[in-house]
Amino acid sequence: MKKRIHLVFSPVIFFLIIGCVGLGAISTEGLNIQRVIAVQGSQTEIYDSSMVWLVEIFGSVEQPLEYRNRETGEVIRKVSFTYHSDVWNAPQTVYFTIYIQARDNRSRITITKISKRDGVYKSEYEDVKNALALVIDDYEAYIIARSLDEW
């Protein structure tokens, strides 16, 4: 009887162990998401629009700017973003650094230093990338709309 129980539970235990390996936290050190956006406007106009977007999306008090320089059109800010995870079927918060570079008629946004309190797991890696792509999509839509707004 004992041998039979071992044979039944051995495959179950094996698959549980293999399944948990897929849940291990992975390094996001090399994960950078970047996009160059063509937008009408001067470096200063794009920079100003970027600053307004940062405040509107991420607030101004809790997460201060790390670096900003209007003359070079650069801003760096550490932020957090809460998204709904399909993997965990619950809200998850991801922390990252946004680096925006404004130039005449273009802007580059880079998201780096991506992390979560409990690490980013293999199974949710695509979820995190997709959530951050939405942040970049929002930025792109915002600065393009602001460049076309001629009130």
Image (cartoon, rainbow, N blue to C red):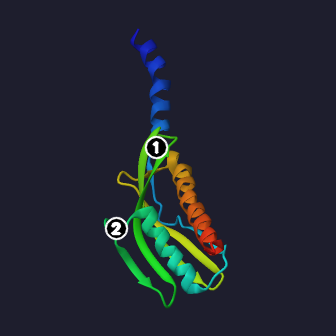
On screen, residue 21 versus residue 133, left or right, reads left
Which residue occupies 53% across, 64% down?
31
Query: Between marks 2 and 1, how big is the CA–CA gap?
Result: 30 Å
Q: Residues within 10 Å of mark 1 (few under 14, many from 20)?
A: few
Q: Is residue 70 above or below residue 150?
A: below
Query: Which percent across, then down, holds residue 30?
Result: 52, 66
Q: Is residue 103 above or below residue 95?
A: below
Which residue occupies 51% across, 89% down?
72
Query: Which percent across, then down, holds residue 77?
Result: 41, 72
* Depth check, front residue: 113 or 78: 78
User: Farthest residue toward the left?
Assistant: 62
For mark 1, give the secondary structure: loop
On screen, residue 53 versus residue 106, left or right, reads left
* Depth check, front residue: 61 or 86: 61
User: Farthest residue toward the top?
Assistant: 1
**Badge 2 vs badge 1, beta-carbon distance below 8 Å:** no
Asked if one can make out residue 35 in the rendered structure from this viewpoint, the answer is no
User: Farthest residue toward the front?
Assistant: 151
Of pointers 2 and 1, the one earlier in the residue sequence: 1
Q: Which residue is mark 2?
A: 63
Nearer to us of marks 2 and 1 is 2
Query: Which percent across, then down, holds residue 98?
Result: 47, 70
Which amino acid, by three-letter code, is at mark 2? Gln
* Depth check, front residue: 104 or 95: 104
Q: Quadrant of the C terminus?
A: bottom right
On residue 23, which mark appears? 1
For mark 2, give the secondary structure: loop
Which residue occupies 53% across, 75% down?
49
Which amino acid, by three-letter code, is at mark 1? Leu
